Image (cartoon, rainbow, N blue to C red):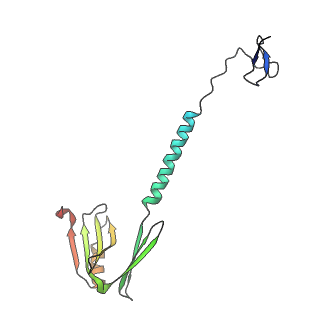
Amino acid sequence: MSTKICPNCNAEVPAIANLCKHCFHDFHVVPPPKKSPFWTLLFLALGTSFVAAMVFAHIYGQQKVMTNVVDKETKSIVFTTKTPDDVTSERVYWKDVSAIEYLTQTRPLSQQLWVVRTDSKRFLYSESNENLTIDAHRLSETVGKPLIERDVSAEE
């Protein structure tokens, strides 16, 4: 006698049976096709990748934090740069500063304030979309060095 396998319980039953004798599965009812998990897994993988990329971009997009301190006691400016891997610090004494440079219409932000050392090495003191004129004059007076103001857009 020929047999068939019940799709519900995997029991072997006679081929002519209408119902499984073990689980009572009806062989005349067509089971719905099983959905492939491919699209679900693909969507989940893409979503997870997108979230991971956004987190990575946020963390490493903000990777550099720059701070500086004007130390009147030692007559110097301390520039500190923090990255996820390292912290670097450099002290520039006022006697080694040749000028304070105030740049406008720069990119990516519209205002930049630089400290220029006598050996022409430059240190970014501040950058903003806000006007830094007061800060530039104050720093120039504190350090006792000339203020050079330049519109970078006019130089292009």
| Residue 48: image location, x then y, percent | 53, 46
In the picture shown, does residue 10 fall above or below 153?
above
**Can residue 131 be seen at all in this image of the molecule?**
no
**Can residue 135 be seen at all in this image of the molecule?**
yes
Classify residue 88 as left or right of residue 121: right
In the picture shown, does residue 23 fall above or below 132?
above
Q: Nearer the viewer, residue 103 or 50?
A: 50
Q: Nearer the viewer, residue 92 or 75?
A: 92
Q: Residue reaching furthest bottom?
A: 73
Q: Residue at x 55, y 41 (%)?
A: 44
Q: Nearer the viewer, residue 72 or 34?
A: 34
In terms of image quadrants, where is residue 35? top right
In terms of image quadrants, where is residue 2? top right
| Residue 123: image location, x then y, percent | 32, 74
In terms of image quadrants, where is residue 28? top right
Q: Residue at x 25, y 74 (%)?
A: 101
| Residue 42: image location, x then y, percent | 53, 38
Q: Residue at x 48, y 67 (%)?
A: 85
